[in-house]
Amino acid sequence: MSEFLPKLLALENFQANAQIRIETLGNFCVWRNHEKIDSKEWGRDKTIQLLQYLISNRQRNALHKEKIIDGLWEEWNDRDFKVALHGINKVLEPQRASRMEAIYIIRQGVSYQIDLEKVWIDVEALEKYIIIGNEALTVDTTISKQAYKAALNLYKGSYLPNRIYEDWTSGEREKMQLLVLGTYITLAEIILKENPLESIRLAQNALAIDATWEDAYRIQMRAYIAKGNRPQAIKTYMKCEVILEEEYGIAPLPETKQLLKEIELIN
C-alpha cells in the first residue's frame, strides 16, 4: 500500500466526521454536528469577523488578544473582544458549561488560536491535499491525481468573498488562488496524454480564475495537438497573445512562442 494513502484517507475521514466544519471558499458557512448553523445564531457580525480572523491566521502561533484587536478593529476594547469570543464559543459549543474551557478555540493566557485537530476548515484541508499530491507526484501518480482532485473539489470560489476589502484576508486569498491555479495546471499536465479533453477543461477552469495565466494556454495548446486539432491550438495562442497585450501590454513568454513554432511545423 502506498505510504501516502493513509494520509489521504485520514484527511477524508476528518472531513466526514469533524463535529465542526468551516467553509470559506466561495461562501462562509459553519457546520456543527453535521448541521449548518443559521446565520442568525451568530448575532453580531463582529463575532463572525473574529472567527474569520482566527481562520486567516490559523497557522501562526496563538495570537495575542491585543494583536487581534489591532488587526480587526480601530475602536474596539477588551470588553468587545470578550463579547465576540463568547459569541463564537456559544455558537460552536451551545451545551458547554460556563466555567469549562472551550474545546475549539484554544486559550493560552491572553493568546488564542483555533484547534486544527478538532476543527475542519476547507482551506486547511485544501493545502494538505496539495501537499500530499506534491509529495506523491514522482512516486505514485494515482494518489497524486486523487489528492489534487480532492483539493480542487473544495474550491468553490474566492476566499471569504464578503471580506474582500479587509486587509487581513488578502494574504490567504492570494495564497489560495495561487495554490489552486498551480494545482489545475499540474493535474492537467499529469493527465494530458490519457485525457487531453479533461486537461483542456482544467486549463479553462484556471483561466476562469486568472485569464492571464499563461501556463493554462500552453496546456490547452498541447492538449489540442494531442487531439489532432492544430487550428484550435494556434487559435489558443492568439487568444493568449491578445489577453496579455490587453491586460499587461506584454507578449507571451519565449516558451509559449516556441510551442507555437513547433505547432506550426506540424503537417
Image (cartoon, grey):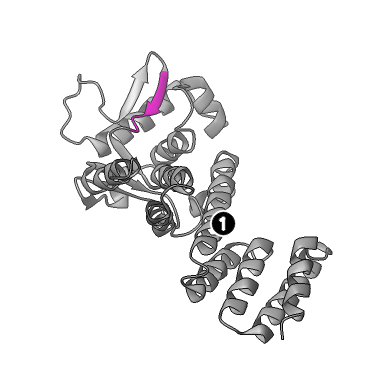
The image position of residue 23, as x and y in percent, is: 37, 50
Amino acid beneath label 1: Leu
Query: Which of 150/41 is in front?
Result: 150
**Is 231 drawn above or below residue 29 in the view shown?**
below
In the rendered structure, the answer to whether residue 96 lies left or right of residue 38 reads left
Where is 150 relative to 109, above or below?
below
- Foreground residue, 177 or 138? 138
**Residue nearest the observer in this picture, 157 or 154:** 154
**Quadrant that contains the N terminus:** top left
Which percent across, then down, holds residue 265? 76, 80
The magenta stretch is 111-116
- On the question of residue 242 being in view, the answer is no
Name the quadrant of the C terminus. bottom right
Taking the image as drawn, is residue 19 in sight?
A: yes
- Residue 114 drawn in magenta: yes
Which one is nearer the viewer's eye here, 146 or 204?
146
| Residue at 62% in and 72% down | 222
Q: Is residue 232 left or right of residue 153?
A: right
Name the quadrant containing residue 94. top left
Q: Which residue matches tag 1?
A: 181
Name the residue rendered at 46%, 23% in the picture.
61
Q: Left or right: where does residue 229 sit relative to residue 105?
A: right
In the image: residue 170, left or right of residue 106:
right
Single out the residue that lies furthest toward the front. 267
Q: Residue at x 54, y 57 (%)?
A: 186
Instruction: Identify the main secondary structure in magenta.
Output: strand
The location of residue 139, given as percent across then percent down, is: 44, 47
